[in-house]
Amino acid sequence: MITDKLLEKIIEKQNPVCVGLDTVLEYLPEELAGGVCDFAGAASAILGFNKGIVDATCDIVPSVKIQIACYEQYGEAGIKAFNDTIAYAKKKGLIVIADCKRNDIGSTAEKYANAYLGETPLKEKRAAVFSADFLTVNGYLGSDGILPFTDACKKYDKGIFALVKTSNPSSGELQNLKLADGRTVYECMGDMVEKWGEDSRGKYGYSAVGAVVGATYPEEAKILRARLPHALFLVPGYGAQGANAEMLKNCFDRNGLGGIVNNSRGILTAYKKRGGNYAEAARAAALDMKADLLSVLGEICAK
């Protein structure tokens, strides 16, 4: 099961860090970005940069997250770089999270599930398109927009992370509103996530349906960890968004499991502060982040 595989990599590497390949041209050093004047050149430079980051970190981190918006802005060439980055990261043994936040009515959600998690039907066969291991989804359209993704998870051994309590400053405008039954909107969504994953739990107790829970809201994270004992948390907000290791400890269980913590800019642009080669700086930043997280979590072990 894919969630078990991710957790086993976290335990093996003693590292819950996810490298966010939310790569844009302005993050690249001059030797890679200089002279780029069209979308094809930008996409090629970004792919080369990504490969350098993956090569430098694949032995110390369990996963990468690839934000599709960063690639869509470069058009067709950018989408190809997105797909090639997925393929390269998987070739290097990393678990790949496609950060696309997809959802729609059921029939359309099924097409998104085909594209990112499963296979697309052709006239005489089915074929994979992007083939990520996990996909971020938006559950705020309700169950009919999520069930096609959970069906794909079961059929293809994939996983999803549903938005529950996001790290952005205005998330509370909706997510913290109180419902008639006394729950907040984010608690209601969390309860739905727990239910959506109840028949896909692996040997560590975590299901194929995880939750996006921002590190910038530690009190809400504590509430959600108690309400969602079987949901793996994808945790944004560390570093550039202001969260530190102490703030995100509530996302984890007592064994140091239950979360994967994303860091994008802090790793991708580490060379701007540290100097030297960008890939070596990224590796050093990832190791520093690992040490910071483990100083709070302690040894990560199986239940």
Image: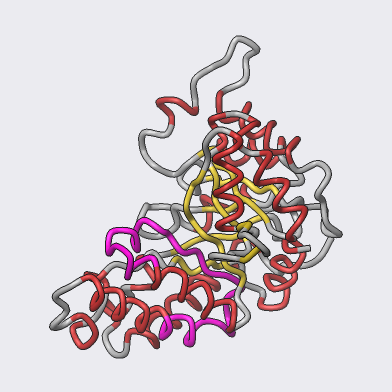
Image spot of residue 45 (x, y percent): 29, 80
78 is within the stretch colored magenta = yes
- Asked where in the image residue 123 lies, by quadrant, the reply is bottom right
User: Is 143 situated above or below 262?
Assistant: above
Q: Which residue is drawn at 55% across and 57% down?
A: 115
In the foreground, 112 or 223: 112
Q: Which residue is the extreme one toward the front?
A: 123
Q: Which color scheme did the rendering employ for the protein?
A: secondary structure
Q: In which quarter of the image is residue 37?
A: bottom left
The residue shown at (58%, 81%) is 60
The reply to whether residue 95 is visible in this rendering is yes
Measuring 64% from the left and 37% from the top, which residue is drawn there? 224
In the rendered image, residue 175, in percent from the top left (x then y), is placed at 49, 28
Query: Where residue 261 sits: x, y (%)?
Result: 54, 60
Please state if 207 lies on the left or on the right of 66 as rendered. right
* Residue placed most toward the observer, 70 or 250: 70
Highlighted range, magenta: 51-79
Q: Can residue 293 be seen in this view?
A: no
Q: Is residue 280 above or below residue 253?
A: below
Q: Which of 288 and 233 is in front in this view?
A: 233
Which residue is found at the position 40% from the left and 79% from the top?
Answer: 282
280 lies above or below 66: below
Q: Is residue 302 left or right of residue 170?
A: right
Furthest-top residue in this view = 180
Which quarter of the figure is the N terminus placed in?
Answer: bottom right
Horizontal and vertical percent position of residue 237 = 44, 52
Quarter of the picture containing the C terminus is: bottom right
Q: Does the magenta stretch include residue 70?
A: yes
Q: Report the label total.
A: 0
